[in-house]
Image (spheres, helix red, strand yellow):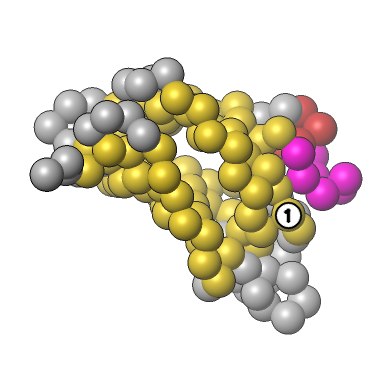
Amino acid sequence: MAGVLATGSIAGCLGDENEAGQLTVRNDHVLDHVVRFSIEDGPPEAYEVEQGVTADLFVGAGETKTYTDLFSTDGQYTLVAELAAGDLEQSITFAPLGGQDGDGEVLEIRLTDSYRLSYTVSPV
């Protein structure tokens, strides 16, 4: 049976407007991984989108790392996730930060041993 090489999640912080979204990546595999996330589209007022933010995240075997300030404003983002292990790209649209009603989404990313990227988006 195919095992999971790496798992990751992106969750928006809910609360005061000074809280930015955060990205947590967990690597459950015995090998190190580099995960590249780039913001392709987002709310017009998002500074990061205007700058075309790309983050190369190194996560060693068995490590969990959290990165902050990747998302600065409410709204829907289109993110491209690329895993260096398989040279695979997947475009994902989600809303990581809560709006006035406090709703946000969590993105779970998984990489199988065949380097197939799969994901689920669910409400916070």
In percent of width and height, residue 15 lies at 63, 73
Task: Give left or right: position of 63 versus 53.
Answer: left
Quadrant of the image for the N terminus? top left
What residue would you read off at disc 1?
A: 76
Chain part drawn in magenta: 41-47
**Is any part of residue 60 visible from this angle?**
no
Q: Is residue 99 above or below residue 40?
A: below
Look at the picture and state if 30 lies above or below 63: above
Residue 75 lies left or right of residue 35; in this view the side is right
In magenta segment, residue 104: no
- Secondary structure type for disc 1: strand
Q: Which residue is drawn at 32% across and 38% down?
A: 111
**Viewer-proximal residue, 13 or 79?**
79
On the image, which quarter does residue 52 sit in? top right
Residue 74, given in percent of the width and then of the height, sits at 74, 60
As shown in the figure, which amino acid type bears the numbered disc 1?
Gln
Across and down, in percent, residue 71 comes to 65, 48
Q: Quadrant of residue 55?
A: top right
**Crowd class of label 1 (few under 14; some 14 to 19; many from 20; radius 10 Å):** some
Q: Which residue lies furthest to the right in this view?
A: 44
Q: Is residue 78 left or right of residue 60?
A: right
